[in-house]
Image: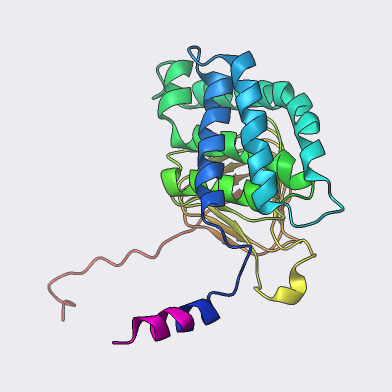
Amino acid sequence: MDRSKITRAILEHKNNPGLKFRLKHRTEAFTDRLFLTLFDQETPVAENMNVLEREFEELVELACWDPDLQCKKLWDQYLDLLPDILRRLNMDAQAIVNCDPASLSIEEVYMAYPGFYAIAIYRLAHELFSFGFPLVPRLMTEYAHRQTGVDIHPGAKIGDSFFIDHATGVVIGETAEIHNNVKVYQGVTLGALYVAKSLQRTKRHPTIEDNVTIYANATILGGSTVIGANSVIGGNAWLTESVPPYSKVFHSPEIVIKTRANVE
């Protein structure tokens, strides 16, 4: 075994200088600290702001490959947005308390509901994504995805008082638009009808209007698909076309009861 030959061969194929996995680990540490700074009563806010700024500067060094973007200047803009992000997240938590009869307290929602955690990291990542600094927010939402089973692209647009119940298996695509007071259950997909690179800059995912409830394992696809306000989408429904406001859409399974006469 010629180890030097193997090493040279690996180095020849290890040709992506921007691929530094410590960026992923640093992003996860930044995400944890940011979440605790906003919610944990025992985590100091003022002191953590300074630490978060230093951590963000390191993320910029690793991930800001566009010299014209001047990513270091983004921190002050992002900091200005944090109070309003927290206000909106408090509305999300209250929506869960109001909608879920199993919730015992708002503290339980903050600490034990994976749907809330996924929404929180999405909202914290979305504003960075909107600045044109995509890799760090993508790593933030993927970190939440790994912990919760909820995959929300940071480019999606989500309104106030959003509720994800049970969470596992929810997928919300990059160009999805969700308005206010929407409830989504486990296994829901807001996806694209087609997967092609040429569609990158087009709206590929559906729009969900105000006060819509989407039950478990429903699949809604397509950038031109609009679910009208106050509609209810039943479990296991498959939709690729728009429905008007106040619609009810249900999947009706066929039930066949076998008797001794027709059992094979």
Asked if residue 128 is positioned above or below residue 195 in the image, the reply reads: above
Which range is magenta? 1-8
Residue at 47% x, 84% y: name it. 9
Of the pair 82 and 151, the residue shown nearer to us: 82
Asked if residue 77 is positioned above or below residue 2 in the image, the reply reads: above
- Prevailing SS of the magenta stretch: helix
Residue 228, position as x, y percentages in the image: 72, 46
Residue 61, position as x, y percentages in the image: 68, 48
Residue at 67% x, 30% y: name it. 53
Where residue 74 sits, quadrant-wise, is: top right
Residue 177, position as x, y percentages in the image: 72, 48
Residue 72 among magenta residues: no
Residue at 64% x, 48% y: name it. 136
Of the pair 50 and 90, the residue shown nearer to us: 50
Where residue 38 sits, quadrant-wise, is: top right
Residue at 61% x, 26% y: name it. 51
In which quadrant will I find the C terminus? bottom left
Residue 86 seen in this snapshot: yes
Residue 181 seen in this snapshot: no
- Left or right of residue 195: residue 199: right
